Image (spheres, rainbow, N blue to C red):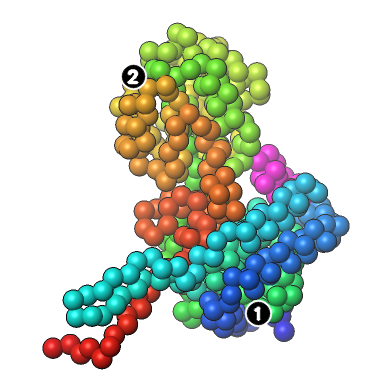
Amino acid sequence: MRMVATEDQDNQGLEALMGEMGRRARGAARILANASAIQKNEALLMAAAELRARLPELLIANAADMADAEAKGIKGSFLDRLMLDASRIDAIAKAVADIAALHDPVGRMLAEWTQPNGLRFERVSTPLGVIGVIFESRPNVTADAGALCLKSGNASILRAGSESFRTSSVIAEAMRAGLRAAGLPEDAIQLVPTRAREAVGLMLKGLDGNIDVIVPRGGKSLVARVQNEARVPVFAHLEGICHVYVHAKADLAMAVSIVLNAKLRRTGVCGSAETLLMDQSVVATHLKPLLAALIDKGCSIRGDAQVMAADPRATEATEADWRTEYLDAIISVKVVSGLDEAIDHIETYGSHHTEAIITDDHAAAEAFLNSVDSAIVLHNASTQFADGGEFGFGAEIGIATGRMHARGPVGVDQLTSFKYRVHGTGQTRP
């Protein structure tokens, strides 16, 4: 039976609710860890069908969430991330079904060997256990995270942002319906049923040891809070201060195409380019066309002296601009002396998320790919490919920008750990 919280629930009641969710998740995780690939896939396919069947309900819930957000004065990219229509709901359902088609990451033989004493060792992939996901405006994370955790044998506790609460609740119920239909515990996917901010703090404490890892999906303040307060491991998902570097050997037509896509395809995603670095040697030929192409598409330019000289519509960039994730039709533009300065700028101001170089010089591309310390580095491709679906992962639970365990798009493989199985024939240690 599901527990339901009210908005004015006191802290003691909320703590009891969250503690019960943690215990239910742990029990579900034990069952899910041993579920067959067929059973997990059935749950995912049934969940995808439920999402499509609940289209009218989802549209109504999302319209209410959108109305509340607009009444609060929320605008721009945030609303775009929140908004669902029929095509986006179909895309969410398709992503869940696509995850069913992925390989099962649990129980894979990662390595095996035999020691001279005859002991046979196996390193085998296992689920992490219970994953807490804290996210803000994107209701699709409810489906993506729930589905990825399910496929990888993990239970999930999802805490949606208050703005997407109604929409996320309907999506979570569809996912739980899929679990029930496949004979799996519905508590393998739980959405925190309250907007109370205190629920986040309780999750960060680990719910009495029942949460094994936290994944934050949201803005800088959320991630900072999670990193400061979490008492369990965190898959850090920092802001996406992504760069595109137009190298001395960049083809102009390719540069225009990639830069426009990297910045403007969807400005509110973490893979959107926020800074354009221009090589000094192609300023005369490439800078004006690139600036004009961006401005003509409605993008504001904040640049250095050479940029403002090339196009008077550009405004002066401040030091803060190089560190800003705009998530809007704004880009900072800087002229650099060459590859080394471009790499130094990215190291100084970047968030270790996603960076791209545009060049026909393969040696320069290799130097960039090897030297830039970001989770994703691209050669002659848009930063908007920073997405688990584009990597063939089906979807992602986030883009991890740390260096431990998981990095880049966190898909089913990254949501597993491993254990050692050791087979003997009666050996004892001398």
Of all residues shown, which one is farthest toward the right?
56
Residue ID at (46%, 79%): 209
**Residue 332 visible to the viewer:** yes
Looking at the rendered structure, which numbered label has been put on residue 185? 1
Q: Is residue 344 above or below residue 143?
A: above
Instruction: Please state which amino acid type lies under the numbered disc 2.
Output: Ser
Q: Is residue 272 magenta?
A: no
Q: Main secondary structure of the magenta part?
A: helix
Label 1 Cα crowd, 10 Å radius (few <14 / some 14-19 / many 20+):
many
The magenta stretch is: 66-83
* Residue 236 percent location from the top left of the image: 45, 56
Task: Tell me the quarter of the picture where residue 197 sits.
Answer: bottom right
Cα distance between the residues tagged 2 and 1? 59 Å
Residue corresponding to mark 2: 337
Residue ID at (40%, 18%): 249
**Lower position in the chain sequence, tag 2 or tag 1:** 1
